[in-house]
Amino acid sequence: MMLLQQIVVGVLVVACALYSAWRLAGARVRLRALERLERLPGLRGAAWLARLKARTLARFSAACGGCSQAGVHAVKPRPR
């Protein structure tokens, strides 16, 4: 019973570490990781992987400077 408890705790710690690393990683790192996962034979046609990649790409394109409006709203100095 103690061995099972240690295995469960170990799996939870690894899962939490992976989740934290994913959330803290930038968009480019996430996209690279997803591209590498797509190369694995068992995950090539995974629907969840495609949805995750689409969501990551959407966030990447919505980043600051990702649209044509970047730089349009520059602050003009006020005349004295």
Image: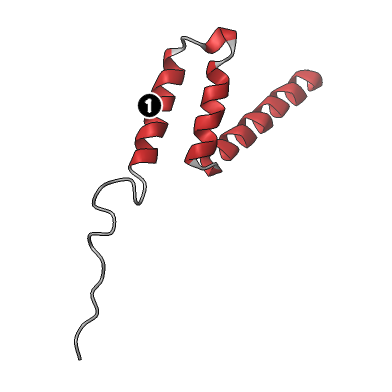
Q: What element does badge 1 sit on?
A: helix
Q: Residue at x 62, y 29 (%)?
A: 15
- Apparent side of residue 33 relative to residue 51 in the rendered image (left or right): right
Q: Residue at x 23, y 59 (%)?
A: 72
Q: Amino acid at mark 1?
A: Ala
Give 31 or 46, whichever is nearer the viewer: 31
Q: Position of residue 28 (x, y in %)?
A: 50, 38
* 57 w.r.t. 73: above or below: above
Give the farthest residue toward the bottom.
80
How crowded pointer 1 is (Cα within 10 Å; few <14, some 14-19, many 20+) is rated as few
Give 2 or 42, whichever is nearer the viewer: 42
Question: How is this picture coloured?
Answer: secondary structure
Q: Residue at x 24, y 79 (%)?
A: 77
- Apparent side of residue 77 relative to residue 27 in the rendered image (left or right): left
Give 53 or 20, whichever is nearer the viewer: 53
Give the farthest residue toward the left.
79
How many discs mark residues in the rendered view?
A: 1
Write down the quadrant of residue 42 in the picture.
Answer: top right
* 27 w.r.t. 32: above or below: below
Considering the image in quadrants, where does the N terminus appear? top right
* 56 w.r.t. 69: above or below: above
Q: Residue at x 37, y 38 (%)?
A: 59
Considering the image in quadrants, where does the C terminus appear? bottom left
Write down the quadrant of residue 12 in the picture.
Answer: top right
Which residue matches tag 1? 54
- Apparent side of residue 27 relative to residue 74 in the rendered image (left or right): right
* 72 w.r.t. 64: above or below: below
